[in-house]
Image (cartoon, rainbow, N blue to C red):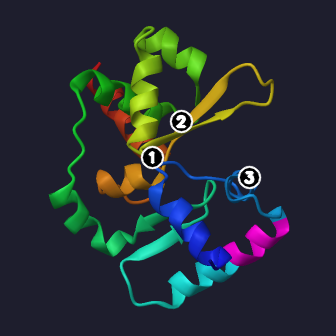
Amino acid sequence: MELKSRIEAVLFVTADAMDIKDIAQILDEDKEDVENAMLELIMDYASRDGALEINDEDGYILQVKQEYFDIVEKLCPLDISPAVLKTLTVIAIKEPIRQTLLKDMRGSSAYEHVQELIEKGLVVRKKDSNGKSYNIKTTPKFREYFKLKGDTKILAKYLEKDEDLKK
């Protein structure tokens, strides 16, 4: 079996972006060989006139290109409870936000909300520099799903101005 095809299989079944080290470990291959094959696979997808691409923003993940997202949305709409949506709103406005601060703002259920949002691909969580907490931020899928253009910080500033006008 060709290494690129094996990497493609890993990317196809995973719901989370993966780094080269993890893919190499799963496939029991040399990290450098996996990295070279991954670059070839990315170029293969980029040269195709298909609906899929490999996103490498926060690791590697196989995803539908943005121009086909409306089709996916019709077939697989995200079901987000109001409580989880409120947690997502806080993340989007305050991003990147420390998980401990989010828990203080939204309560201990925020941990489960974050996990659900990670599984849906709407947020990512990474250890912060002290290694004790996590920073959480939205993903490109979040912006695509909610049809947001640009930076969510602009939206946050707009909402703050709106709140100031109501006072």
Residue 112 percent location from the top left of the image: 42, 20
Q: Main secondary structure of the magenta part?
A: helix
Q: Give the range drawn in magenta.
A: 32-38
Q: Closer to the camera, 108 or 76?
A: 76
Q: Which of marks 2 and 3 is in front?
A: 3
Depicted 2 relative to depicted 153: above or below: below
Say which residue appears at 37% left-offset and 41% top-offset. Answer: 158
Label 1: how many Cα within 10 Å (few below 14, some 14–19, many 20+): some
Marks 1 and 3, Cα distance to the nearest angstrom? 36 Å
Residue highlighted by disc 1: 152
Q: Name the residue under label 2.
A: 95
Pointer 2 and pointer 3: residues touching (CB < 8 Å)? Answer: no
Which badge, 2 or 3, comes first in the chain's sequence?
Answer: 3
Q: Disc 2 vs disc 1: Cβ atoms closer than 8 Å?
A: yes
Query: Which residue lies under the disc numbered 3?
Result: 25
Asked if residue 163 lies left or right of residue 104, the reply is left
Residue 39 lies within the magenta run:
no
Q: How crowded is mark 3: few (under 14 residues within 10 Å), some or many (20 or more)?
A: few
